[in-house]
Image: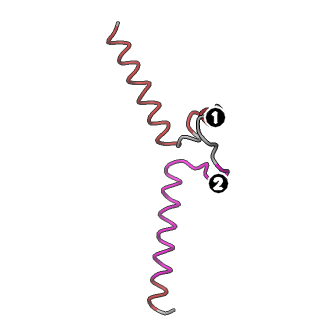
Amino acid sequence: MAKLFGIIVIVVGLWAGVEIYNEGTANAFDGALARMGMVEAAEPGEEQHLGQRAGSKVRKSQAEAEARRSRMLGE
């Protein structure tokens, strides 16, 4: 019985960790942590999933590189 309880605790812990990793603390568990006052609520523009946040950073980096390249070429 103790092994079963241990396995359940591990599975729930992994699920909670993955949820927080993917959604961020403000959006995890459909915003339950933010509603309870445990974390600050997300700004309207910050409600992005992990893939969307990564894509935004990549696009920003590419734009900065293009701007730097344009300045160096003098165009």
What is the residue that sits farthest to the top in this orientation? 1
Q: Quadrant of residue 3?
A: top left
Name the amino acid type tagged 1: Gly
Q: Quadrant of the image for the N terminus?
A: top left
Residue in view at x 63 percent, y 46 percent = 42
Report the span colored magenta: 43-68
Q: Is residue 55 left or right of residue 32?
A: left
Q: Residues within 10 Å of mark 1 (few under 14, many from 20)?
A: few
What is the residue that sits farthest to the bottom in this orientation? 74
x%, y% of residue 44? 67, 51
x%, y% of residue 54? 48, 56
Residue in view at x 49 percent, y 87 percent = 71
Instruction: Please name the predominant secondary structure of the magenta segment in the image.
Output: helix
- Compared with residue 20, is residue 69 higher up or lower down, i.e. above or below? below
Residue in view at x 42 percent, y 27 percent = 13
Cα distance in 3D space between marks 2 and 1: 20 Å
Residue in view at x 53 percent, y 53 percent = 52
x%, y% of residue 4? 35, 12
- Compared with residue 40, is residue 5 higher up or lower down, i.e. above or below? above
Instruction: Say if mark 2 contacts mark 1, CB within 8 Å.
Output: no
The residue that disc 2 covers is 45
The residue that disc 1 covers is 37
Q: Is residue 6 left or right of residue 72?
A: left
- Compared with residue 17, is residue 47 higher up or lower down, i.e. above or below? below
Q: Is residue 49 magenta?
A: yes
Q: Quadrant of residue 41?
A: top right
